[in-house]
Amino acid sequence: MCEVLSFPPVTKVTISRNNKLLPATELRYRVGGVEAQQSLSHDIASVKDGDYGDYLCSAENEEGKSNWTVSLVRTSK
């Protein structure tokens, strides 16, 4: 859901929902690197009703900080 590809590598990634920071223990990251680049993503393995809504993603490295919003919406079957 929140994915970061960065060079220089990311030093901090946070994800919040409803103005509350999600604890790192709740984040399910897949972390991998490709030649000094860093890729991070937050995925929701099994979506529940309470998971729908807007998430604020934030990433920092030595060059600065970036924020963006990701919306998880329900689609009809």
Image (spheres, rainbow, N blue to C red):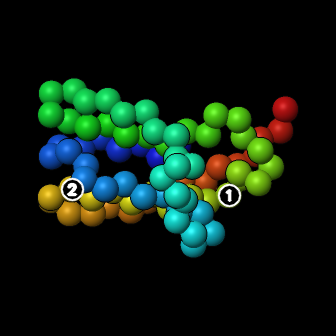
Does residue 40 appear left or right of residue 6 in this picture? Answer: right
Residue furthest front in the image = 25
Residue furthest bottom in the image = 19
Q: Position of residue 29 (x, y in %)?
A: 46, 39
Q: Position of residue 57 (x, y in %)?
A: 45, 57
Q: Position of residue 37 (x, y in %)?
A: 20, 36
Residue 53 disc label: 1
Query: Is residue 69 something one can see in this rendering?
Result: no
Query: Is residue 58 something one can see in this rendering?
Result: yes
Does residue 73 appear left or right of residue 37 in this picture? Answer: right
Task: Say what amino acid the circle numbered 2 marks.
Answer: Asn
Q: Residue at x 65, y 49 (%)?
A: 72
Residue furthest right in the image = 77
Residue 48 against residue 24 in the figure, above or below: above
Q: Nearer the viewer, mark 2 or mark 1?
A: 2
Question: Which one is in front, 71 or 26?
Answer: 26
Element class at badge 2: strand
Q: Position of residue 66 (x, y in %)?
A: 32, 61
Location of residue 32 by image quarter:
top left
Task: Say what amino acid the circle numbered 1 marks.
Answer: Gly
Residue 61 disc label: 2
Q: Residues within 10 Å of mark 1 (few under 14, many from 20)?
A: few
Element class at badge 1: strand
Does residue 10 appear left or right of residue 1 in this picture? Answer: left
**Of marks 2 and 1, which one's residue comes earlier in the chain?**
1
Quadrant location of the C terminus in the rendered image: top right
Q: Residue at x 31, y 56 (%)?
A: 12
User: What whole-number distance in Å separates the C-alpha atoms at marks 2 and 1?
Assistant: 27 Å
Q: Residue at x 52, y 49 (%)?
A: 25
